[in-house]
Amino acid sequence: MRGLAAAANPLLPLDLIARLLDDPGTSEGAAADPGLPAERLHGLLDRAGLSHTTGR
C-alpha cells in the first residue's frame, strides 16, 4: 500500500512516474498521479483497451 501512495506523489518527476507505470506493484498509484500528462493517461486507456473518446 505504501508503494501505491508513493507512486501517486504529485512531486515525482515524469520519468520516474513512467517507470512506475511499468511496474505491476506501483502502476495503479502511478496512474493516479496528478502530474501525469493527459496524453500519457490516454495512452494507458488505449493499452487497457478502453477508448478515451467513447468510454468503451
Image (cartoon, rainbow, N blue to C red):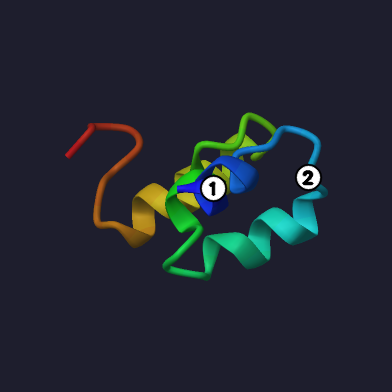
Give left or right: position of 46 versus 33. left
Amino acid identity at mark 1: Arg
Disc on the earlier residue, 1 or 2: 1
Image mark count: 2
Depth check, front residue: 28 or 6: 6
Above or below 40: residue 34: above
Residue placed most toward the observer, 37 or 52: 37
Direction from residue 30 to residue 47 in the image, left or right = left
Residue 25, percent from left and from top: 45, 65
Rendered residue at 25%/47% (across/down): 50
Q: Which residue is mark 2?
A: 12
State the image coordinates of residue 15 (x, y, percent, origin top left). 78, 60
Front disc: 1 or 2? 1
In this rendered view, identify the residue nearer to me: 7 or 55.
Answer: 7
**Between marks 1 and 2, how big is the CA–CA gap?**
15 Å
Name the residue at 63% across, 29% down: 34
Q: Which mark is residue 33?
A: none
Which secondary structure, mark 2?
loop
Local secondary structure at mark 1: helix
**How crowded is the residue under tag 2: few (<14 C-alpha within 10 Å), some, or many (20+)?**
some
Q: Position of residue 48 (x, y in %)?
A: 29, 57
Q: Residues within 10 Å of mark 1 (few under 14, many from 20)?
A: few
**The C terminus sits in image quarter:** top left
- Furthest residue in direction front, as rendered: 2
For residue 33, above or below residue 14 = above
User: Which residue is the site of mark 1?
Assistant: 2
- Give coordinates of residue 31: x percent, y percent: 50, 45
The answer to whether the residues at label 1 and label 2 have Cβ atoms under 8 Å apart is: no
Taking the spot 35% from the left edge, 37% from the top edge, the residue there is 52
- Looking at the rendered structure, the kind of residue marked 2 is Leu
